[in-house]
Amino acid sequence: MKTVNVGILGLGTVGAGTAETLLKQGPLMEARTGIPLVLKKAADLDLGRDFGFEIPKEILTTDAQEVINDPDIQIVVELIGGTGIAKKLVLDALAAKKSVVTANKALLAEHGTELMAAAEANGVDLFFEAAVAGGIPIIKALREGLVANPITRICGIMNGTCNYILTRMEREGIDFEVVLKEAQELGYAEAEPSLDVDGWDTAHKAVILSQIAFGVPLNLEDVPVDGIRGIDPEDVKNAKELGYRIKLLAMLDQSEKGYSVGVQPVLIPMDHMLSNVHMSFNAVLVDGEVVDETLYYGRGAGRLPTASAVVADIVDAARDLSGDAHARIPLSWNANPAPAWIPPEERLERSYLRLFLKNAPGSLAKVAEKLGSYGISITSLVQHENDEEGGFVPVVIVTHVATVGAIQSALADLAEMPHLVEPRMVRYRLEELNS
Amino acid sequence: MKTVNVGILGLGTVGAGTAETLLKQGPLMEARTGIPLVLKKAADLDLGRDFGFEIPKEILTTDAQEVINDPDIQIVVELIGGTGIAKKLVLDALAAKKSVVTANKALLAEHGTELMAAAEANGVDLFFEAAVAGGIPIIKALREGLVANPITRICGIMNGTCNYILTRMEREGIDFEVVLKEAQELGYAEAEPSLDVDGWDTAHKAVILSQIAFGVPLNLEDVPVDGIRGIDPEDVKNAKELGYRIKLLAMLDQSEKGYSVGVQPVLIPMDHMLSNVHMSFNAVLVDGEVVDETLYYGRGAGRLPTASAVVADIVDAARDLSGDAHARIPLSWNANPAPAWIPPEERLERSYLRLFLKNAPGSLAKVAEKLGSYGISITSLVQHENDEEGGFVPVVIVTHVATVGAIQSALADLAEMPHLVEPRMVRYRLEELNS
């Protein structure tokens, strides 16, 4: 079969891993697909760095345009990252009628609609499996394996740094800041950790999955995002006592009423598969109306696991090129009718609350009454007798389903009653994850 | 885009579920793929049965050939089952240059090579996602998502009946026969349960996965198969005490030395994801050299979950037809060099043993000595003081890695020493599942 030539832009961690995988697994992939893949050119501004293996000198260049404009190169792989030069180069490659593979979640989340339109206009593929949950073939599962399914829910642990921190907080009972510092020293977390720990990286992935699952574009700005920075080991411990674990989840829900997307720490049952995703692993739970509950698990980051997904996309694009089957899988689709967006405050959620109540008769009754006045009922309550501190005692409350707006209003009211509760209040979503 | 016409052979549980999904999810799938799918004909010998929903009368026929020979029908879906008439009809459909989709694992495991050759010769697709692990898109993951990976291991819980029985045995401490009877009454197990509980259904799936993962054909007869019929609640309890669960696994391993495939009950660590696959759910753990550990979880059977996979295959075939991209994914491939087959007795495994030793000084030392003479060392040993019965006490031994041949020889020697041990001996594989 005819050779397909590939060019890579960016030889950082994932770029070098992709080059290595293309070269090392080339014979295996040719045996499996019948298509010889050739890495023709690879561009990076810094050719002096250690790529972790030997890249043939003659394919290296510092000029990205040399890759894009090489008439032999049919697939351009963008692994530079960010939304600046990467965006321009992807658009240039698409305009030059090259199929493009990228792992760039920020680019897809912020400019996906524009890039997909450009790919469609030029009749080429734009694949991005590695942008969501690293090596796990989740986009392929959603677009192809579950194509017959209205998607009712996606719950994803899609940031390895956060899951690593939460796992260690739970296992060792230590503070967020302590684990973060160690994770930074070990290279598991960035020096500027905000993209990860404040939930934005997960939100990028949620926006990408939302378009694929629900068929409606979504702006990153509309997604409510909470990270793990404020999580207290006390709440991790309380969750455990109640039979739950705290995980940072992207939660995408769809029902007849509409759809919602959010990123937040959520208490999930300890015996659920998602709770047993430890350290830096990722997993995505997908509920489909036909297939019921499914789950996909693996490494969400790392040099080679991410390269596995990038190279799978390259092979898919090469298969389309060999078979002359561009746009075999449409890049975007539009649900008709488009589902309604359920704003955050109207969403129905169960809550885990930790409040500090005045240690006096009737305190609890007043809180219960306040919650009740907003239609919020309590399913369980834990108060340890000897926990008093400065006249206030911590009380853990788990509620039935209520709108987030009702919970927020009730907590705002309570915050105005300093004689009854301290102003510090903790609230997390709690999900049984029943299918 | 041009309509693709589909015909179904067999309207049993999965056939009716497939017809329902095609009709009910047609608009969604057309929005997602751009391809209108039409269910043109559906054949079954018994048109009087309850299909669970309304199939339009005008598409029903009792004549399978009418479906195969309809010039408008491009995709034939075989859901009759078995290896008799189903095989003939699949070959007829392929010869008529129709793409074929089937969920028939026995057919694929026993005649896969012949059927794939026929599909390739006729330039059409032959897809069978639903034949392995029901609704889970595991074949797509292996062939496409993990295409860059030498596969080093696959461990699959791929029979829901067995997993249901083992889950209930563990949770309730009851006998195999009791759960089996209840499962039969509830319709979770067949009246003739051998295909499931003796491991043959799992073995069919293992043979299919072996070809896809390792690129070498495998005869069902060469696969060592043990089922769950003999499992004693005592061993389930002992496993739990040691921190393990017993699961019926298909285990496919590949290293530089060669590859092996087997079906057997295995003790796996309780905190591993695979251990937390409960009741009738399935899961497949796949280790790839590039991606590391991945796992795929969902329903392995059932009317609609299986239909989800069948319809995904229909859509894939329709995409190939629309884009004129037949054989986009080669049906089979040949590893070069082909990996060597490691025969069962040469495989390296850890063992869980339960022996009944003479309650006399030195018994244990003699057993340890016998194991040692075959190079088998003990990692842990449990003996409960007050368990004596007729002069013999049960002892649970966990060993280091040794060849299965060595273990078998040691046990055969011990069986010749009735003054030391009772002839009843239990042995299961034990796997840490480290990646």
Image (tube, coloured by chain):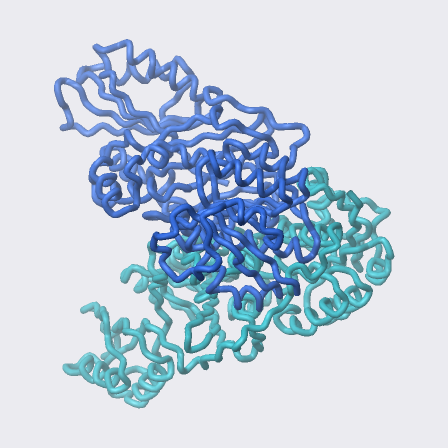
Chain colours: A cyan, B blue
Q: Is residue B23 above or below residue B86?
A: below
Residue at left offset 46%, top offset 46%: B79
Quarter of the image where the N terminus of chain A is located: top right
Res. A300 visible in picture: no
Residue at left offset 62%, top offset 52%: B71
Quarter of the image where the C terminus of chain A is located: bottom left
Query: Depth check: B155 or A52 in front?
Result: B155
Query: Depth check: B35 or A313 in front?
Result: B35
Q: Is residue A249 above or below residue A216?
A: above
Query: Depth check: B75 or A13 in front?
Result: B75
Quarter of image, res A45: bottom right
Q: Is residue B1 above or below residue A371?
A: above
Q: Is residue A304 left or right of residue B221?
A: right
Quarter of image, res A387: bottom left
Residue at left offset 80%, top offset 56%: A43
The picture places residue A25, in percent across and down from the top left corner, at 69, 41
Residue at left offset 65%, top offset 33%: B334
Res. A28 visible in picture: yes
